[in-house]
Amino acid sequence: VDTVRAMAYLALAQYPAFLEPYLSVWCDGLQDRNKNIRLTAIQTLTNAKIPLPEELQPLFLSLLQDEEADIRRLACQGLCQFQNRQTTDALIACSKRDISPVVR
């Protein structure tokens, strides 16, 4: 079941026009228990050529605590779009404490 769900996210990621209309699906993907789905969701949103909605900021902030370094790295990249004090402070803290060089 997880493999099929991961494949569905990968297929949906191929169509950028589906980002905004299916934002709730991507939000669910960011919170999924399956690391491949979380990775596909954050990769797709971070690389999207659209401004990220403010409602994604708390989800991206929570992903700074993810067990996967690549997800934390992409969360840092995505958070750069939200230029406010909260994200700046979170990025500075993450750069100081994260053990992975790909995140720092």
Image: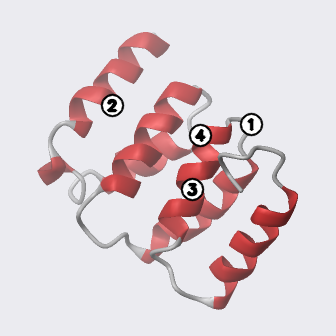
Q: Mark 3 points at which residue?
A: 75
Q: Name the residue under label 2.
A: 9
Task: State whether residue 10 is above or below residue 16.
Answer: above
Identify the residue position indicated by label 4 in the image.
70
- Left or right for 2, reference 63: left
Amino acid type, mark 4? Asp
Residue 71 quadrant: top right
Mark with earlier residue (4, 2): 2
Q: What element carries label 3?
A: helix
Q: Which of marks 3 and 4 is nearer the N terminus?
A: 4
Which residue shows up at 50% across the image and 79% down it? 82
Q: Name the residue under label 1.
A: 67
Looking at the figure, which quarter contains the C terminus? bottom right
Nearest the camera: 52 or 73? 73
Label 1 or label 3, whichever comes before in sequence order: 1
Task: Choose top left, top right, bottom left or bottom right for residue 20.
Answer: bottom left
Q: Where is residue 86 in the image (x, y as percent from the top left)?
A: 68, 83
Choose top left, top right, bottom left or bottom right for residue 52: bottom left
